[in-house]
Amino acid sequence: MLDGRAAIITTDGADVSAEFLSGAYQALELVQKHGIRIAVLKANSPSCGNLLTYDGTFSGVKVSGEGVTAALLRRYGVQVFSELQLPEAARALTAQD
């Protein structure tokens, strides 16, 4: 996994880490192709969460940390926000003008 993160496992026990990582790199490719510097992603997702992610137990428990896509985009200079941070994302957009 990216940065030594735990594997991403489905409810039936399948390891889907490679698929999540592939999706993250596909998102990065599009971000770079289109010059995107700010992204609004889904809060708490194991892929897109930017502050918290679900812990993988399917119990609704959240832990500190980023999802794989959020972490990869941030590593490449993209400012990542969740849908719960729209005012902050709007301020970041304004600051770029």
Image (cartoon, rainbow, N blue to C red):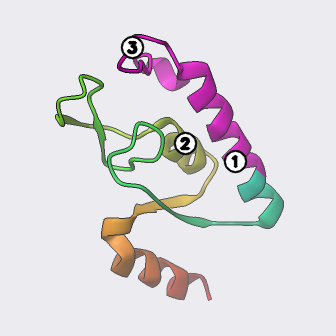
Q: Secondary structure at mark 3?
A: loop
- Check contact, mark 2 vs mark 1: CB within 8 A: yes
Looking at the image, which is closer to me, 16 or 33? 16
Given the current orientation, which residue lies at the most extreme top position? 13
Numbered tag placed on residue 88 in the rendering: none
Q: Amino acid at mark 2?
A: Thr
Q: CA distance from mark 1 to mark 3?
A: 29 Å
Residue underneath mark 1? 28
Query: Tag 2: Cα neighbours inside 10 Å, few (<14), some, or many (≥20)?
Result: many
In the rendered image, the vertical position of residue 25 relative to residue 97, given as above or below: above
Tell which circle, 2 or 1, labels the residue nearer the N-terminal end: 1
Q: On residue 12, which mark appears?
A: 3
Disc 1 residue crowd, few under 14, some 14–19, many 20+, Cα 10 Å: many
The answer for how far apart the CA atoms under marks 2 and 3 are is: 23 Å
- In the rendered view, would you say 51 is above or below 10? below
Residue 66: name its quadrant.
Answer: top left
Is-magenta flag for residue 17? Answer: yes
Where residue 25 sits in the image (x, y, percent)?
Answer: 69, 38
Verify whether residue 57 appears in magenta: no
Q: Are marks 2 and 3 in contact (CB under 8 Å)?
A: no
Pick whichever of labels 2 and 3 is earlier in the sequence.
3
The residue that mark 2 highlights is 69
